Amino acid sequence: MNALWIIALNTIREASRQRLVLALSVSSVAVVSGSLLFQQLDFGKDELKFIVDFGFGSMTFLGAILSIFATAQLYFSELDQRTVHTLLARPISRSSFVLGKALGAFVVVCSFLALTATTLLAVMLYRSSQLNLASGSWIGFDVIVFSILQGFRSAVLISLVMFIGSYARSQLLTVVVSLFLWVVFQIQYIANSAWDEAASKTTRFASWVLECCVPNFEKFNVGDQLVFREPGLLRLGGLFELGVYAAAFTALYLTCAVWSFNRREF
Amino acid sequence: MNDPSEPVIVAEELVRDFPLELKGYRVRAVDNLSFTAGKGRVLGLLGPNGSGKSTTIKMILGLLKPTSGQVRVQGGDPSNRVTRKHIGYLPEAPYFYRFLTGKECVRMMGKLSGLKNKTLIERVDAVVDQVGLSSASNRRVGTYSKGMLQRIGLAQALVHDPDLIILDEPTAGVDPLGTVEIAKMIRTLKESGKTIILCSHLLSEIEGLCDDLLMLYQGTPVFHGIATDLTQSGNIWSFQVSSDQEDTEIAARDALESAGFQWISSNRQVGQSLSEAFVDRIKKLDSISTGDENS
């Protein structure tokens, strides 16, 4: 357990010096702050929802990009520079290495989400005071809920990247396959709903297998529900349910990553 | 006393194949390799490039599994992390985290080896001092020269006071003075009962250090035994004499021939070898600068 924390801490240190992490963090802050420019369009009260939408988009897209690229980079830097030899020659288990790297990457992505959420809240506070809106009319709590949900989604993505990286021979392959699967996860619900409607038992079984192995990332796209108070508004129970859903897939992919990495030879 | 009969490493009929991209084709990197490394002995692992030295080291470290055969380190399987507590490893051309200072790097490796609190601090300071990097230990590893990287690599290999130390090209990139110091360090480690596996291409450096040799060629052992058995076959004696006078060479030759030796050749060496001269000069400069600092 101690080794896991040491590796995680070292991963965070390494990530904090990576240009990619810095560039994406700056981009995210710039995008959210840039949404203030739309006040020229005079949306009035709806402008806040527009800003929130901008911020949520930034969290979803840049958060996923960071989860995939940073995890792959942090993992393969150990392999390419052969520091993994020095580490694994120590009395540590390979699972500590995999879980430590994943935990480090997760903390980095969570920091990114916290930074974006804080910027978004600051922008909203500033704009609502300019528009003389009552404090209750803006949706600060929903921003926090949304960023937590993106944290869940990032945990699944990071564990997926670790699994692919545990057998892939190159960083490029890991990134390409992860990006492809991210898209698949986003549109999983389309295939699932189409198959669910099918009469054939085989197709329904295939749909069930797909649901068990491939997470439905559409479940985390609750920005509109939160901002526009659409029907099916996420309650605390729903948030917990999504947390369990993400944890189950994270555990599944991390178990596969550890299993595969244990068989990897250097 | 060190007991060479007490083996620290026992390798039995090790075979390691690597699959090629072409289906069904395999390359045999190590073929039927059996050897032992006795406690407190220095084993030199020699061989040309591609002879299986690195593969053998990786199998001892548990980074690679043998295709067949087995290797035991102090009776345990090296793929078991408890067994690796006894191993210190300096990789070839070591790379460490550029953003850490030398001391942080050694501390991290010490922590991973289970050292804690006061013991950790003491051991880190001791090994950093031992490799002569105390003055640069708070600098980032990214600013280190190749020789300094090698030294910090040695420090991290020794920090947890392992019984078995595996040094892969320990003097690569190190200047002659550093090479002499590392050789001295290896002797000290050996005297303190450590078992050392020394892998190097620089045979002249290995020669005076190793008790035993394991020579590999295309994955197959071609010699395993006491180093002097390989180097001193044929009773060839070598004398090195010096004199200020020109005519003493003939007198020395006559004396040796009359004692029954066959004269083969003589070399007139003016002064020291380049290596000796370099080491002497640097040591003098070091002592002057140390004197300046003290004064």
Image (cartoon, coloured by chain):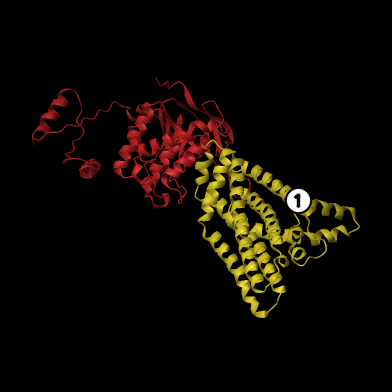
Q: Is residue A230 above or below residue B227?
A: below
Chain B drawing hue: red
Task: Say whether residue B198 is left or right of residue A249.
Answer: left
In the picture, measured across the screen, residue B232 lies left or right of residue B256, that is right
Foreground: B276 or A198? A198
User: In the image, residue A88 lies at what x, y percent?
Assistant: 54, 40
Q: Residue at x 55, y 35 (%)?
A: B15
Residue A73 is situated, as x and y percent measured from the top left of the image, at 56, 55
Q: Quadrant of the N terminus of chain A?
A: top right
Q: Is residue A156 visible?
A: yes
Residue located 84% across and 60% down the image: A193
Residue pointed to by mark 1: A240
Q: Given the image, on which type of amino acid does mark 1 rest?
A: Phe
Give the residue drawn at x 38%, y 30%.
Answer: B189
Q: Quadrant of residue B193?
A: top left
Q: Position of residue B121 (x, y in %)?
A: 44, 37
Q: In the rendered picture, chain A carries what hue?
A: yellow
Subunit bearing disc 1: A
In this view of the protein, can residue B133 be seen by the observer?
Answer: no
Looking at the image, residue A251 sits to the left or right of residue B193; the answer is right
Q: Residue furthest right?
A: A199
* Label 1 residue SS: helix
